[in-house]
Amino acid sequence: MLRRSIALAGALACAFVFFGFSAQAAAVEDESSKIIEDMYKESGADKLFYALPESSRDFLSEIGLSDFRPFAADSITPNRLEGAIKKAVIDNFDEPLRVFLFIIAAVVIAGALDTVKGGLAEQKLLSLAASLCVVSAVSPPLISLINYLGETISAAGNFMLLYVPVMAGLMAAGGGTASSTAYCGVMIYTSNLVVQVCTRLVIPLMKCIMALSITSSACESMKLDGVIEMFRKVSRIILTFCMSLFVAFLTMRSIVAAAADNLANRAVKFAVSSFVPLVGGALSDAYQTMISCVSVLKSGVGAAAIAAVFAVFAYPVVRCMIWQMTVSAAAAVCDLFGISRLSSLMRSCSSVISVMFAVMMCTMVIYIIGTAVIIIVGKG
């Protein structure tokens, strides 16, 4: 009987301790969630979603992301992402298909008439007429595509200029003062530089290349294929070098700053727990809890920002890919019918689109890697 009483008392004591700890853990978790929610609103992260263009917000909603709260990115699934990309392809497929069919019709008609008219003058006239028809069909959408590139990079840069101070504030609140300073300076400088270079140099230069390509297609004496190909190769080399330099510099600065912040945080916790009487240990634990909450919020906001950057560039990248395939297929059709003037024009357009694609991909990768590096290296 005594043994049963002791066993019952032990079981009750264990249950009391277990449920007491569980209740205490639940209370701590609720308090941490409240702290994270308050920080989320006070940091300005709740306004980042509405700083994106409407098309980007729609894309994020399709993949399951409607805000920048922690763990919001967990709702993104491969099926949703695949569906959103398919929708982007379908939405951007109509105009390139119409232009491609128009080019095929112009080439077929020019080839059919070429078999009827055997004179050299008539052949040149038909080739010139076909070139002018194709130029009138291809030029407006490609110029619009170049302008769309500028708008996309400006929208991404504006979003980063709003996002970077929010992330820097969270990093500073989590004890990452040095990391915050390094990240904020590098990313704001890079965002401004990318926007200025693209809008004032890259976009006008690509329009000039398009104009030269059109002129070359109308005047056989001008051969600009080599110049355009050189421009494409040089631009890719410069973009690759700049991207590598940015990633190396940001990683180096982040590693050094993270080490300094880690040392400072350890010193603060040691000083609080050692020199504050009675409640030093509790204050040290509270400090660590606060840092952990900020770290959770920072990681969640950073993951959502990566998804947001991808959403900004998703439609332009898909449009560039479709136009690249369209003009490449058109160049193959022109080669098949022996119309070298149109084939040269299509290859020049393909080079311009290739440069546009490289610029967008490099810009997107710079923003994504910059955000990912600071999340991984600068954890509090």
Image (cartoon, rainbow, N blue to C red):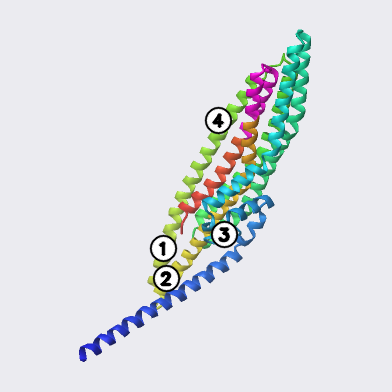
Image point (60%, 55%), residue name: 165
Residue 237: image tag: 4
**Magenta segment: does it hold 262?**
no
Image point (25%, 90%), residue name: 5
Say whether residue 151 is visible. Answer: yes
- The residue lying toward the viewer, choosing from 108 and 249, is 108
Residue closest to the far bottom? 1
- Of the two numbered discs 2 and 3 on the same chain, state the one appearing first in sequence: 3
Q: Nearer the viewer, mark 2 or mark 4?
A: 4
- Residue 89 place in picture, x, y as percent: 63, 42
Say whether residue 306 is visible. Answer: no
- Of the two numbered discs 4 and 3 on the same chain, state the one appearing first in sequence: 3
Label 1, secondary structure: give it: helix
Residue position marked by numbered label 1 in the rendering: 267
Residues drawn in magenta: 327-356
Label 4, secondary structure: give it: helix
Left or right of 264 on screen, residue 38: right
Marks 2 and 1, how far apart at CA: 14 Å
Crowding near pointer 3: few (<14 within 10 Å), some, many (20+)? Answer: some
Label 3, secondary structure: give it: helix
Residue position marked by numbered label 2 in the rendering: 285
Residue position marked by numbered label 3 in the rendering: 169
Is 331 located above or below residue 27 in the figure? above
Crowding near pointer 2: few (<14 within 10 Å), some, many (20+)? Answer: some
Marks 2 and 4, how far apart at CA: 51 Å
- Of the two numbered discs 2 and 1 on the same chain, state the one appearing first in sequence: 1
| Amino acid type for the residue under numbered disc 3 | Gly
